[in-house]
Image (tube, rainbow, N blue to C red):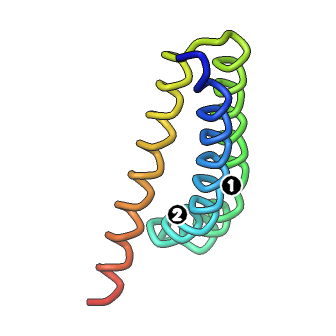
Amino acid sequence: MENFLLPIFVVNFVLVLCDASLGFFIVPHLLRREARGGDASGRAGRSAPTLLAVAVAVYMFFNCLAYNRQSMIYLLVVTGLILADLTGQFVVYRKIRNTGER
């Protein structure tokens, strides 16, 4: 099972990049849509990149920690969290797109 540590680490790295790029487009749109005021909308849009950077840093920290400790279970938990985050972003994106068409 230890033979799969490096490939899973690399897959996690790519998933984190996909998660960040998807969030870069979805999160500001969602925050602006939910914030009704002019000032609140601007602040929400400016805070989104900071939140995304923190999320990427946390995911990559735990990804590297799991790889350096050679812990397959820990690495798979990180993979599951990243996939859950990506799935949540796709669900939110579909809901935004479907409500925008009506």
Q: In screen coordinates, is 18 left or right of 68?
A: left
Q: In screen coordinates, is 75 left or right of 77?
A: right
Residue 53 % position (x, y): 72, 46
Q: Which residue shows up at 67% across the image and 52% down it?
A: 17
Residue indicated by mark 2: 31
Residue 46 % position (x, y): 71, 61
Query: Considering only vertical position in the picture, is 15 above or below 95?
Result: above
Task: Looking at this view, name the residue that lies furthest to the left.
Answer: 102
Residues marked 2 and 1 touching at CB (< 8 Å):
yes
Residue type at tag 1 = Ser
Residue type at tag 2 = Leu
Residue 28 quadrant: bottom right
Task: Looking at this view, name the residue that lies furthest to the bottom.
Answer: 102
Residue 58 % position (x, y): 66, 31
Residue indicated by mark 1: 47
Q: CA distance from mark 2 to mark 1?
A: 9 Å
Mark sitting earlier along the chain (2/1): 2
Label count reads 2
Q: Residues within 10 Å of mark 2 (few under 14, many from 20)?
A: some
Residue 59 quadrant: top right
